[in-house]
Amino acid sequence: MTARPRRLLTVCLGNHCRSPLAAVILAQLGRDAVEVRSAGTRDKWLGQPARAEMVAAAAARGYDMRAHLGVHISKELLDWADVVLAMDAGNLAALRELADERTVPKLALYLDDRDVPDPWGKDAAAFADVVTLIEDGAARHLP
């Protein structure tokens, strides 16, 4: 019997830049060993595609984010996940508000002890830097 893939949930503010990028990178690098979803703590971009600047920065590194549509975090997603990776401390705090005693232990920062900066409103270099940070941090979450 084959083991079930490790379920990773990546979370940022709007599910518009960082968390969908992390989901694409983790899924591509983890292949069949992981199942990855992403969500946002705000519902402002629900059903919307990823930010164009992030899609371009990801594509420059070989990652395709074009299929992404924004999702809002839910208790069901927290239950589904084995690990929930917040992009920053603010996202982690919002997740703790939604989590219960079973799901709180699943919560962590993507970069362990520091935030993945939000590139929103910044230049293309900031988006490229986020791709590098998320790519460099991926190995810690893959089996």
Image (cartoon, grey):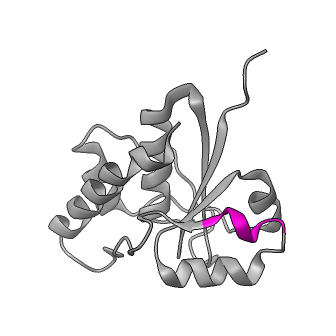
Q: Is residue 111 above or below residue 81?
A: below
How many numbered discs sit on the rendered protein?
Answer: 0
Q: Residue at x 63, y 68 (%)?
A: 46
- 103 drawn magenta: yes
Which residue of the protein is positioned furthest toward the top in this rendering?
1
Q: Residue at x 24, y 42 (%)?
A: 61
Nearer-the-camera pick, 37 or 133: 133
Q: Residue at x 77, y 74 (%)?
A: 99
Find residue 16 and report its horizontal and vertical position in percent: 48, 66
Residue 33 appears in which quarter of the rendering?
Answer: top right
Residue 112 appears in which quarter of the rendering?
Answer: bottom left
Relative to residue 24, is residue 52 drawn left or right? left
- Magenta part of the protein: which range? 102-107
Relative to residue 23, is residue 127 drawn left or right? left
Relative to residue 70, is residue 101 drawn left or right? right
Q: Residue at x 50, y 48 (%)?
A: 141
